[in-house]
Amino acid sequence: MSTRQAKGAAAEQLAADYLQRAGLSLIERNFRVRGGEIDLICRDGKTTVFVEVRLRSRGDFGGAAASITAAKQARLILAARHWLLRHGETPCRFDCVLLDGLEPKNIEWLRNAFSAD
């Protein structure tokens, strides 16, 4: 595993722990289909939550939030549609967990960060 992959895995673990402490249930990690991937899939009550985790160690280029482009959102939506086809349609939303460094105090959780519409 490369240093970058190790940091990404650590960021996803921090995000998963944070969301579980907030009451969400983790269903799946790193769901991949051709053309897209979802870092974390959680359940919040009856809602399926597709979570993108973004780690930025520097604030250049706008930080973690700025890296979730329209193209990235389209890939997440594609993967979410595949997941819902396999597991059944439920209400869903797209959240982002942003980390500026690998410290729990640097976590920002954006609920309903974007929509599939």
Image (cartoon, helix red, strand yellow):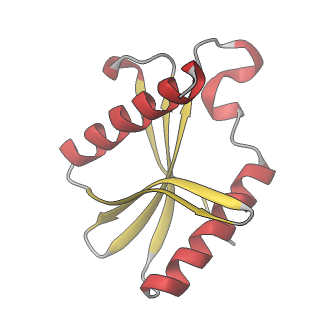
**Residue occupying the point 73% across, 50% down:** 72
Name the spot of residue 115 as percent of width and height, x first. 62, 64
Which residue corresponds to the image point at 33% horizontal and 43% vertical from the top-left?
16
| Depicted 49 relative to depicted 106: above or below | below
Among the 4 quarters of the image, the one containing residue 102: top left
| Vertical relation: 3 (above or below) 21 | above
Q: Is residue 113 visible?
A: no
Q: Nearer the viewer, residue 117 or 26?
A: 26
**Number of numbered discs:** 0
Q: Is residue 81 left or right of residue 100?
A: right
Residue 100 horizontal/vertical position (percent)? 51, 19
Q: Quadrant of residue 19?
A: top left
Q: Is residue 21 above or below residue 82?
A: above
Q: Which image quarter holds the C terminus?
A: bottom right
16 above or below 47?
Answer: above
What residue is drawn where x is 77% and y is 19%? Answer: 61
Q: Is residue 63 left or right of residue 102?
A: right
Give coordinates of residue 10: x percent, y percent. 41, 28
Instruction: Determine if residue 41 is in view.
Output: yes
Which quadrant of the view contains residue 79?
bottom right
- The single residue placed furthest to the right in the displayed view is 71
Q: Position of residue 13 (x, y in %)?
A: 35, 36
